Image (spheres, rainbow, N blue to C red):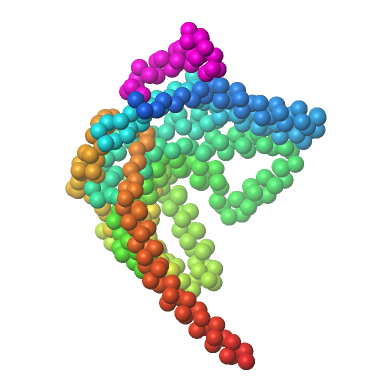
Amino acid sequence: TGLDLLASPSAESKFDDPRVVAALQRLPAPEDTLVFLDGKQLFQQLHEIPDFITRMSQGQPDAERVTGLLTELINQCSVIDHEISVQYTEGFQQRTATFGQLTENLREKVVGRMVVDQKPFENWMSFVPENAVGFSINDGCNLLPLYDWLMKEIPMRFPEVVPGLDKFAAIQNQYDVHLREDILQSLSGEFVSISLPGPVTMLGKQSDTVFMLRCSEPEHVEGLIHRGINALAEIRVVAQQGLSMKDVPGLDGFQQIDSGAFAMAQIAPVIGFHEGWMIVASKVSAVKSVFATKSGDAASWANGDRFKEFGLSINGPVQSISFTNTGENIRAMSQTMQMLGTMAPLMLGAAQAEAVEGSANWI
């Protein structure tokens, strides 16, 4: 323990662990903070949970089945060998650097198969327009290995769920939409989310958004979306909103979704497919802004002064990078609160007037 080390400084500590020594050699000096996560030890401790349940259940069969599944789930998640983070101060900035190591048998685990083959971003800056107020780019995870494992493991341990799964399969066949083949196999998990300056509405300053999800079967997924929109349009309440889709001029492969609700919210969402990505955006102009950056016709956020302020040098592919303009978000929230404060008396007055009129009618 820490007290033992104070009493005997020569005793072995975690800093004698070869993994810690090797990781610290890859990181800046930990001036402010150092955090070490021992993944192997963590998952060993997690195994004590099903062991405790087993002891307390006194041999109950249902409890044994649950603990068996929990034990296997922990095994399938144990892919982190260790991770170490350090914090240090550079000028007026506090920086964090992290080094992590995954286990050697990564591909034998479900969680490992969910992340090991994700595609990194070779040129992340080409996705982010210069005027972006925030973005998140991540290689994500593939849910297909998890789905396959659950569909095998759960029926094996809980045979009573098989009729429910058969009913689920029958529903998928009825509507010709299959979760595994149509969705999970087509969407691998890599995504890009970008926020751009938007209009000022009655609720204050808003952002335009672009969300991109890597898609290997664009034509198939597009067909599913059209079927879904057509099915929604047959619902009376939705039909009253005039839900429809129309091609976007000058933007091949994209369609705009129109409805009365969207018009009131001052948004005109578009959806389309481009170069292996399914793209959903709040406006056509947002998509065009991203495309202009990706083609090199417009400047990237990475070329702007904001990124230069961080003094970061990012070379080669990245798995994850994000930026949040905290100050801008606070100012937008403040404007929204001010607008709500202005509108609140009007809304309360209208509600009171309606209540008085209702009382008069009742009398």
Q: Is residue 192 left or right of residue 150?
A: left
Residue extending furthest top? 10
In this rendering, position of residue 186 left or right of residue 254: right
Across and down, in percent, residue 38 comes to: 51, 22
Residue 100 visible in the snapshot: no
Nearer to the camera, 170 or 356: 356
Q: Which residues are magenta?
A: 1-30
Q: Residue 263's spot in the image, x, y percent?
A: 38, 69
Residue at the image position 26 percent from the left and 42 percent from the top: 126
- Taking the spot 40% from the left edge, 28% from the top edge, the residue there is 33
Q: Is residue 83 above or below residue 267?
A: above
- At 49% from the left and 41% from the top, the residue drawn is 185
Give coordinates of residue 292: x percent, y percent: 23, 49
Find out whether residue 25 is within the magenta segment. Answer: yes
Q: Quadrant of the N terminus?
A: top right
Pick the front one: 163 or 301: 301
Q: Is residue 257 visible?
A: yes
Give residue 236's position: percent from left, percent from top.
Answer: 54, 72
Q: Quadrant of the C terminus?
A: bottom right
